[in-house]
Amino acid sequence: MRPECLYPLFAPVSALPGLGPRLAPLVEKITGAHVVDLLWHLPVGLVDRRFMPTLDQAPAGRVVTLKVHVDRHMAPGGARRPYRVVCTDGTGILTLVFFHAKGDWLEKTLPAGSERVVSGVAERFNDDLQMTHPDHIVPVDRLDEVMTVEAVYPLTAGLPGKVMVKAVRAALERAPDLPEWDDPEFLRRRGWPSWREALGTVHAPQRDSDLIPATTARSRLAYDELLANQLALGLVRAQMRKLSGRVIAGDGRLRRRILDSLPFRLTEAQLRSLAEIDADLEAPLRMLRLLQGDVGSGKTVVALLAMATAVESGCQAALMAPTEILARQHLATLQGPAEAAGIRLGLLTGRDKGKAREKILADLASGGIDILIGTHALFQEGVVFRDLAFAVIDEQHRFGVHQRLDLAAKGQAVDMLVMTATPIPRTLMLTAYGDMDVSRLDGKPPGRKPIATRVLPLARLDDVVEGVRRAIAGGAKVYWICPLVEESEKVDLAAAADRHAELVERLGPRVGLVHGKMKGAEKDRAMAAFAGTDLDLLVATTVIEVGVNVPEATVMVIEHAERFGLAQLHQLRGRIGRGDRASSCLLLYGGPLSENGKARLNILRESEDGFLIAEEDLRLRGAGELLGTRQSGLPEFRMADLTSHSDLLAIARDDARLILETDPELQGPRGQALRTLLYLFERDGVVKTLRSG
Ligand code: ADP
Ligand code: MG
């Protein structure tokens, strides 16, 4: 259960004074639903109101605080004219200007004859000093409240900055003193303040240099978050380790036959990864390994050989793909080698219903299927294996880390191999997987030709279409990718359909279309027609899934390449260059491209190394945008900025490791404080796995 000291922070934002039914939803929209989310809402700028000149000295165009005598009100002559209040200070005249103002409110706030402090941006018209809609108007005895440096927060439409400042201040007042979870010696060496002090500091910037990620206060909070992240991952892992695994050892007979049936020899990287997987399978521990390899690096055959070992030892294996198309593709590629070895494959997807499904389930329960391939339908209720020992999850990031944890939590005594084609930079890798064992397939299978990549403006579309026509005449197969922006799927689909119609008109009927709104069977038909001999060109939204394999495809056109993440472009491009023929990729960009945008696309032109591309993308875009964090299943950080705090991540990993070695159940005084930290950053799912303390 959440510690009581945190209750005030997990109250809804509407519990804060000043946030009624109109404003609370706006705050919630930009920060999150709870009071604690306001603490994590960091200022992005500041306004210094400490400058208080006399009226004759007040410069135009900057924020000033002015002490004035209210002289008289000038109600507007017409509906569209502003309301004016004339003030003086003995050195000059200041006119306050209000549009759409309520006269009675102004009479109350600025009574004629009173002394007031106003703060805002002053402007000069001829010799007149003017201030339109001052940010603050207070009686003179409240001067101190105004003469400060004010934090500026990210806002959303309709939410005044003042409201946000007040809301954050109220949230800070609710922040309790929490037991220190960091090592005091470590804090001293770094010169880091306590948690509460750090919060106070980050929300009260005094100068621009207080707004950068490297300040002691921001570093401390970032570290807290990273430590919570690493600790949570460490706990999950420790939990899984405690679950005993089984010893899976094969005699190599099926594997031998598979290898004999392949038209190629395994690469060094494949052999190495396979040896690492074998060692895990043989150990009596629960296996959790990530097989990371660029698109086309040959993960599938490694998975098959590993699954064969499970089958050799008399058990079953499962291969889960994120989509229907990919599941079918896996079946198609594995069928040949599996048959050669006498391994029986089955396929189960959400599309299988009724009799067909029952038959599969019966075969599965009786052991008539050795390896079941499918989508997440594999892990639905009612799917019962005779003896599942080994599961391979393909393209992990599409499922998200949570699903992996859910699966683990189901407690099936299953060794798990997770395959990902996303070249996740090392930094992000650590945040998503912690210390998970990793095998890497670096490099591509031999014989691949490099892909020639060019960057062109969309304005050259006509030339591109002619080029494509020539390529097709020369026997090429062409992918034509239209972007899909989540916000307006309809519009995007229409754009893809229009492009399809246009290309049919210009290139003839051997042009197909596949998009995400199509029914499964329809999609399969289009893909099959393209893989076969019926289509030369396939217009696709990004549904051409990671992993789809049409080795004859050698040309790819990507429209509005600037709208994609680099990692995604790299993945898409990986669909071509799979055979032994030279391939080319055309990145078409719309509109004028920024320097940064150009630099990004040029990285792709210059490199085919997914890991390098991912690191560069991280550098140019920041972690948040890298993969579209939401789809990627990578954790989102509030305080930590992985481009600037990556050194802290490594320290947090080591710290978490040490903590869990010395106090695996988080029982000691520091352990108890760390539990609070986990709750604070909402990583509390894992605390449930601990004994209460
Ligand atoms: P990934 O899933 O890693 O993107 P695949 O497993 O689909 O890659 O492999 C891509 C292609 O490379 C497949 O056609 C596969 O048969 C082929 N392949 C795999 N390993 C080798 C190898 N060692 N030598 C040559 N071709 C290979
Ligand atoms: Mg694959």
Image (cartoon, helix red, strand yellow):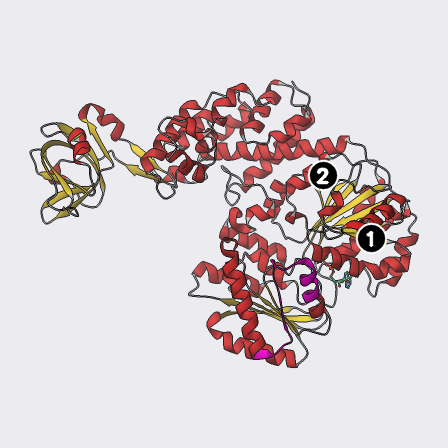
* The image quarter in which residue 17 lies: top left
Q: In the displayed orientation, state which residue is furthest to the left.
A: 90
Callout in the foreground (1, 2): 1
Q: Position of residue 332 (x, y in %)?
A: 79, 61
Q: Is residue 585 left or right of residue 177?
A: right
Q: Is residue 86 left or right of residue 105?
A: left
CA neighbours of label 2 inside 10 A, class few (<14), some (14 to 19), many (20+): some
Give 683 or 603, whichever is nearer the viewer.
Answer: 683
Residue 442 appears in the picture as rendered: no
Locate the C terminus and report the quarter of the image it occupies.
top right
Q: State yes or no: residue 202 in magenta.
A: no
Residue occupying the point 62% across, 50% down: 424
Q: Considering only order in the chain, which callout, 2 or 1, is on the residue closer to the N terminus?
A: 1
Which residue type does callout 1 highlight?
Gly
Q: Position of residue 21 (x, y in %)?
A: 39, 32
Q: Which residue is mark 1?
A: 346
Give 283 or 549, whichever is nearer the viewer.
Answer: 549
Residue occupying the point 67% across, 54% down: 421
Q: Is residue 82 left or right of residue 303?
A: left
Residue 338 appears in the picture as rendered: yes
Measure the C-alpha gap from mark 1 to mark 2. Answer: 21 Å
Q: Position of residue 105 (x, y in %)?
A: 19, 32
Q: Which residue is mark 2?
A: 407
Locate the N terminus and report the quarter of the image it occupies.
top right
**Mark 1 secondary-structure assignment:** strand
Residues in magenta, as a range: 506-527
CA neighbours of label 1 inside 10 A, class few (<14), some (14 to 19), many (20+): some
Q: Which mark is residue 35?
A: none
